[in-house]
Image: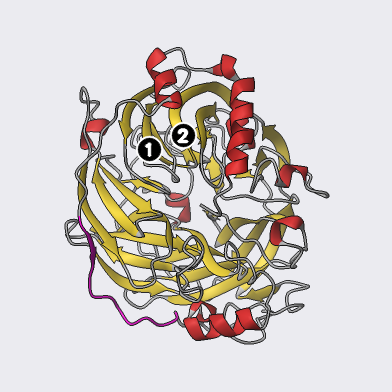
Amino acid sequence: MEAVGWLLVAAAVAMFLAVGALGASNPLNDLLALGQGTGDTPAKAPIVKRKEPPFVATPLAHCRRGSHPEPGVDGRVPAGSASKGLTCNVKPIGHQGTEGGFKVFRYVDTHGHVCAFYDTTLLLPLNALNPGAGSKGVAVLDMSNPAHPVQTDTLTAVPMLTPHESLNLNTKRGLLAAVNGNPATEPGLVAIYDVHADCRHPVMDSTALVARFGHESGFSSDGKTFYATATALQEITAVDVTNPKHPTAVWQGHIQSHGMSLSPNGNRAYIADPTGKNMLILDTSQIQARKSNPHAREISRLTWKAASIPQNAIPFTEHGHPYVLEIDEYNQSTLNPGGDPDMVGAARIIDIGNEAKPQVIANLRLKIDQPGPHAAATKAGDPGTGNAAQGYAAHYCNVPTRVNPKVVACSFIASGLRVFDISKLTHPKEIAYYVAPPKPRSENGYQASDFAMSMPAFAPGHQIWWTDGTTGFYVVSVYKSVWPHARRSHRPTRNGAPAHARGQGEDRDPTLRR
């Protein structure tokens, strides 16, 4: 929720009326989209704060030969310092496009084509109409040569033009989906594309009004349930996409959710609550099992010292033990005028071995995210720091696999792409970063600061794919000498999917294991 832009809701409604003929065939779906109607309101679990690790910055590894490091405090990018980009233990190898949004995905289809998908619209209609803007919709790239990405298609169904943070990929079934969104919310028009046969040219399965509202989303691992989250409202819609040509709403929950990730079996949702400033663990087993009139159950809610605006929560396991990587965006004053502007949310690892009593065990923070350095950089007028919805703060992170990941990659907005070694979960360290050469544009207030908002994706060869809001899509390779070794814990199973149809962040992706 980058700022509450209600003027954009009016624009969204106008678009919604223009595409009314695309509505779902099920009258229930129309009611879900247009009215508050009925829905499931689980009893709320209490918000609890538990003992946390020391509130310190994550240490940075030595930047090796070939790096062009930052001039001072880790994460700080003073005016003019990044005109040619800043690097630490990474080599830029590919670039494409002029804008970027909130999500980047990698996918290998059934014929072995390697593709990238990324949304290009930070804020519709504003950034699509900005002088110099040259992108709209979701970009589709042929990544057969990562040094030379080639755009092969652009997805322009209405939800792909204004997905906000909802673009989502299910790699098992090869489904790419999004719901209308903006910084607040929009009517829940959902678009689904099939990418499994030829990812270079996705085929639209459906565009239907099957959710009440949209902003962010979740996708079950089996690819049968797409969740549209409203973020600004207490509304989540579960959409059955077993037949993606005819999606249907199967559950409506009165729960506030920013990002929403599902457990591998779909029975748990890990929900970032943006206004309650906590992470919710939600029992979604009845929805997953398609029980008649399903009900969800709140298991626990956890908050923490630096909670700002929880953005997303990604479950993973280490040697079979469950954890969550949780990411906050911005700082505590962004939506709260009385909040501390120097208390930056950043990211953390949460132990959920006892899901009724989750606990933060490690923080992922840059030195510039600490209150003292952050206040000094803001006072000095560093580019981007004058906007509470930009500046030195986190936005999205990702892991290469949800089983024994050793690396986390994050977008830290004005600090660019940051890479962390989590081989020792309680003692993470930063091992690499890339700050793209900034470009002054209206999106960043002509401040010449990075606008790194996207969830990164991973590829073989220690590659990370990622976008910057004002300069486009990048491929960088992390030095092998700093990339942690990931031991094989078991042979991945096919789970009914073709062995070569893979994306990032999945248990079954052997291409990213060492």
Taking depth in this image into account, of 316 and 167 the one nearest to the observer is 167
| Residue located 70% across and 56% down the image | 443
Residue 272 forms part of the magenta stretch: no
Image quarter in which the C terminus is found: bottom left
Magenta stretch in the rendered image: 46-57
Q: Which numbered marker is on residue 235?
A: 1
Q: CA distance from mark 1 to mark 2?
A: 7 Å
Contact? badges 1 and 2 (CB < 8 Å): yes
Helix, strand or loop under label 1: loop
Q: Amino acid at mark 2?
A: Phe
Q: Amino acid at mark 1?
A: Glu
Place residue 265 in its image quadrant: top left
- Secondary structure mostly seen in the magenta stretch: loop
Residue 56 forms part of the magenta stretch: yes
Residue where numbered disc 2 is placed: 213
Q: Position of residue 130 (x, y in %)?
A: 78, 47
Q: Is residue 364 above or below residue 20?
A: below
Q: Position of residue 411 (x, y in %)?
A: 55, 62
- Categorize mark 1 by other alpha carbons within 10 Å: few (<14), some (14-19), many (20+): many
Res. 224 visible in picture: no
